[in-house]
Amino acid sequence: MSDQNNEHHGGYYTGDVHNQFVPEHYDPKNRKKIWTTFWILLAVTIFEVAIAFTSLSKELLMWTFVLLTIVKSGYIVGIFMHLKSEKKSLQYSILLPFLLIVYFIAMAIAEGNYLHKMF
């Protein structure tokens, strides 16, 4: 693209045809949002690493890690994938299948623990 065309759209060429002129992607005001997200995710990750070295039971650690991973992934989807600002119907169409998958994983873990104790 030419520089004149880029100036017309008010953005710069990013190499991504679909998102090259989205104002959020080059607005300097969003740097604070990016850094805030970085620090929140870093704090949760440091907490995960710290509790790995505690004397908590293995099962409690496992469920804590699963929960914190879901929290981090939800935060990333809400902020960086802009799901937080979408219509409620789109949010639910993504959230409900995700919750169903999490439920199936929890049931598989519970079933695996039950079968492991039987044999």
Image: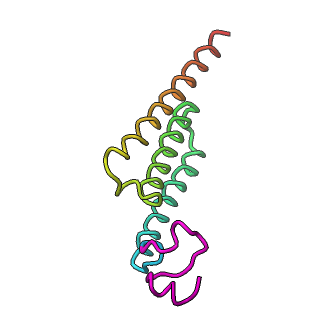
Q: State yes or no: residue 4 in magenta.
A: yes
Q: Position of residue 52 (x, y in %)?
A: 59, 45
- Residue drawn at x 57%, y 39% as measured from the top left: 55
Taking the view exactly as shown, the residue that stands out farthest to the right is 119
In the picture as drawn, the residue positioned furthest to the top comes out as 118
For this view, does 62 lie left or right of residue 71?
Answer: right
| Viewer-nearest residue: 32 or 4 | 4
Q: Is residue 34 magenta?
A: no
Residue drawn at 57 percent across, 23 percent down: 108
**Residue 108 higher or lower than 81, as above or below:** above
Give the residue drawn at x 49%, y 54%. 44
Residue at 57% in and 18% down: 111
Q: Position of residue 65 (x, y in %)?
A: 54, 41
Quadrant of the image containing the N terminus: bottom right
Residue 110 pos. (x, y %) = 54, 21
Which image quarter holds the C terminus?
Answer: top right
Q: Position of residue 18 (x, y in %)?
A: 53, 66
Q: Is residue 117 left or right of residue 69?
A: right
5, 30: nearer the viewer: 5
Number of numbered markers: 0
Main SS type for the magenta part? Answer: loop
- Specify whether 86 is left or right of 62: left
Which residue is more in the foreground, 41 or 20? 20
Q: Quadrant of residue 105?
A: top right
Along the line of sight, the residue nearer the viewer: 51 or 69: 69
**Start and end of the magenta stretch?**
1-23
